Structure formats: structure tokens, C-alpha cells
Image: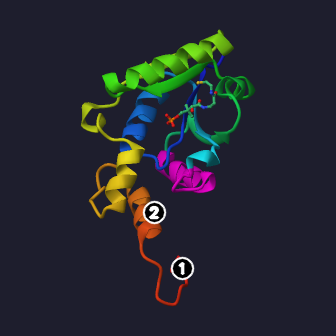
Amino acid sequence: MKRIAVYPGTFDPVTNGHLDLVDRGRRHFDGLIIGILRNEDKEPMFSVEERVALLEDAISGWDNVSVDSFDGLLVDYCKRAGATVILRGMRALSDFEYELQMALMNRRLEPEVETVFLTPTEAYSYVSSRLVREVARLGGEVEGLVPKTVATALARRLSPPTPSGRDPR
Ligand code: PNS
């Protein structure tokens, strides 16, 4: 039986920390699906389609990794995808409480699906999508924290509109 894991998240946008975790996780499973939650309530910077495209670009070359999006309960998506494992990253103690609550709730909802935690390399232990968005918004340098395509997408998203009002994209 193939062991499939889902790595769920918002990925707004994907960071090098996420990719480090994907690279670690993919070595332990036959298939790893990066599942992007469709949740417009969070008013994301990038649409789901844009996030899928940025992730697909970042994972090219890893043949047992794929990208998908889902809504509704994560455990229901896992069942539909044939996954028995939820993969999550644990960067620091501050992640623990939130992650424990989610893991226990998911276990209550579906005892057959196990949550597995991996830690990213310490170089990325402070990196989050929220901080990357904030730094980029305020004009800071995000090189080295996100893939080049994401840095470019952030710069384009945050560039001021042209005087004609036309979007240069
Ligand atoms: O990267 P994030 O934003 O911390 O990811 C959170 C995510 C997507 C894993 C979580 O919000 C989720 O699984 N949402 C789906 C809804 C769900 O299943 N909720 C109940 C179980 S906690």
C-alpha cells in the first residue's frame, strides 16, 4: 500500500521553510500532496491559483510531490486523496499549542489519519509567510527566504500602479 501524506497550509506565499519541510517529508512517503486551503476569509495576498502556480514552480524536479487545493475539512480531503498522514512543520515552541490542538481535533474527526511533525532547518525556524509579506510590504529584502519566483511575484504585487492606471503586469 502506498503511503500518501498531505502537507496542508495557506502558503501565502510559499517560503523556503515550507520547501525545506517538503524536501524532508517527501523522502518518507511514496507521495506528498501540498494541500492549499481555499479560504478567502483570510484575504490572501495571492489567489489560490497564483499560490498553486508558485508552488508548482518551486517543486519541479521532485517527482513524488504534487500541489492541490481543498476546502472543507482537512481530514475529508485526506480521505478523498487517499492520504493517511497529515504532515506539519514545528518551528518553535510557539507553534506547539496551535499544532497540538489541530492534531487532536483531526484525530477526533478521523482516528485513521495520523499527524506527523517535522522540523525545518534552524536557518528557517523564524521564517513565516506572514513575516515575509510584512517585510516585502515595508520594502525589506526577502531574498533567501523565498524562492526567486516568489520574490519576483511579491515585488510585482507590491509595485505601485503606473500613472496611466494600467497594471504593468
Ligand atoms: O498554514 P496554516 O494557515 O497554519 O494552515 C492551517 C490549515 C490549513 C492546516 C488549517 O486551517 C486546516 O486544516 N483547515 C481546514 C479546516 C479543518 O479541517 N478544520 C478542523 C481541523 S483543525
Residue at 39% from the left image edge and 20% from the top image edge: 96
Q: CA distance from mark 1 to mark 2?
A: 14 Å
Counting from the top left corner in percent of width and height, residue 5 is at: 58, 25
**Residue 47 on the magenta span:** yes
Region of the chain picked out in magenta, as a range: 43-60
Label disc, if present, on residue 106 of the rendered structure: none
Q: Quadrant of ligand 1?
A: top right
What residue is disc 1 on? 167
Q: In the current view of this chain or complex, which residue is farthest to the bottom?
A: 164
Secondary structure, magenta segment, majority class: helix
Q: Quadrant of residue 72?
A: top right
- Between 120 and 104, which is closer to the camera in this rendering? 104
Vertical side of 10 occupied by 48: above or below: below
Q: In the current view of this chain or complex, which residue is farthest to the front?
A: 41
Which amino acid is tagged 1?
Answer: Asp
Can the viewer see residue 10 in this picture?
Answer: yes
Callout 1–callout 2 Cβ contact below 8 Å: no
Q: Quadrant of residue 1?
A: top right
